[in-house]
Amino acid sequence: ELILEAVDLEYSYPDGTSALRKVNLQVRKGEKLAILGSNGAGKSTLFMHFNGIYSPSSGTIKFQGQAISYKKKPLIELRKKVGIVFQDPDSQLFSASVWQDISFGPLNLGLSEEEVTKRVRQALTDTETSELEGKPTHLLSYGQKKRVSIAGVLAMEPEIIIFDEPTAGMDPRHSQEFMLLLDKLSSEGKTIVLSTHDVDLAYSWSDRLAIMYRGEIIAHGLPGDLLTRPEIVKRADLTIPWLIE
Ligand code: ADP
Ligand code: MG
Ligand code: MG
C-alpha cells in the first residue's frame, strides 16, 4: 500500500542550483526505505518536500494518493502524520531545556498534560536522553542534540518517520542503539525512511533502497540486487566498505 509518493519532482534553489531532476519515488506503508547517496545527491532537498517545507519547482508530492496542499491547515495536518528528523539538529531545537524541546510538538497538538508527559518520558527513554531532560539544549554535544531532535519527532507519534542521516555524528554505541530503536518502531508498524551515505548501513537495514546521484534516482529496488552491482555503486560515487557477494 502506497503512503507517500514523489511524482516527477523537480527542484531548483533560488541561486539556480538544480537539486532534484524528475524524481519518482514511492514509499509503502510499514516499509524500511533507505535513500543512499553521496554528499550533494539531493537527499535532504527531497526530504524537505515530504512534509511541505519546500514546494516543488515542478511535479507533485502525494500523501495517501492525494497531492499535498501548501495551505496552512492541511500542512499542519500533514506534519502530524509525516515527521522529519533533520540532518542538522540545531534547526529543530530552540527551547531552554531538553524537556521543553521534546514537549513542544505534542503540546502544540493540543494533547492533555498527562499524555504529553507520557510521550516525552517514552521518547526520552527510547533515545537514551533521560539523564539530559533538565539540561539546556544548547550545551549538549552534537550526538546528544541529534538524539534529542529524534525524541522530539517521536513524541509527535507520526505514521511515517523520515530520518536525514540520523547516525552521522553519533558515537558507535548510540548509533547501534538507534538502529535497535528503528527495529522497535518498525515492529510497531511505523513507516521509516532514512537517508545515508553508508552503504553498509543501507544494505543491512533496508527493505528497499533508492540510490541518488546529482539530483536523480539512478537505481531502486532490493538492496541485495543493487549493491551487488559494482557499476551502480561506482556511478553513485559511493565508497563500498566491503564487497557484497
Ligand atoms: P544531500 O542531502 O544528498 O547531501 P542536498 O539536498 O543537501 O544533498 O543538496 C543537493 C544539491 O543542492 C547540492 O548540489 C547542494 O549543493 C545544493 N543545495 C543544497 N542546499 C542549497 C541551498 N540552500 N542553496 C543552493 N543550493 C543548495
Ligand atoms: Mg549533504
Ligand atoms: Mg543532506
Image (cartoon, rainbow, N blue to C red):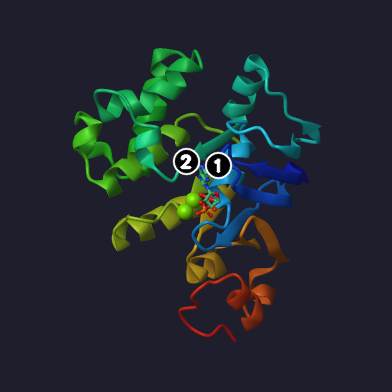
From this view, report whether residue 40 is shown above or below residue 61. Answer: below
Q: Is residue 104 above or below residue 47?
A: above
Q: Residue at x 62, y 74 (%)?
A: 235
- Residue at position x 62%, y 31% in the image: 52
* Residue with the mark numbered 2: 85
Q: Is mark 2 within 8 Å of ligand 3?
A: no
Q: Viewer-nearest of labels 1 and 2?
A: 2
Work out whether 156 lies above or below 47. Answer: above
Q: Which residue is mark 1?
A: 161
From this viewpoint, is residue 168 visible? Answer: yes
| Residue 210 percent coordinates (x, y) | 66, 61
Task: Tell which residue pokes out farthest to the front in this image.
Answer: 15
Q: Amino acid at mark 1?
A: Ile
Crowding near the residue tagged with mark 2, few <14, some 14–19, many ≥20 C-alpha atoms within 10 Å: many
Q: Secondary structure at mark 1?
A: strand
Residue 106 locus on image (x, y percent): 45, 22
Q: Which mark is residue 178?
A: none
Who comes first in sequence, dot 1 or dot 2?
2
Residue 114 lies left or right of residue 133; in this view the side is right
Q: Quadrant of residue 236?
A: bottom right
Tell me the amino acid under the disc marked 2.
Answer: Val
Q: Residues within 10 Å of mark 1 (few under 14, many from 20)?
A: many
**Residue at image point 31% right, 63% down:** 172
In the picture provided, is 67 more to the left or to the right than 141? right
Query: At x 63% / y 38%, what residue is drawn?
Result: 50
Camera sees residue 191: no
Q: Quadrant of the C terminus?
A: bottom right
Tags 1 and 2 touching, CB below 8 Å: yes
Q: Nearer the viewer, residue 232 or 135?
A: 232
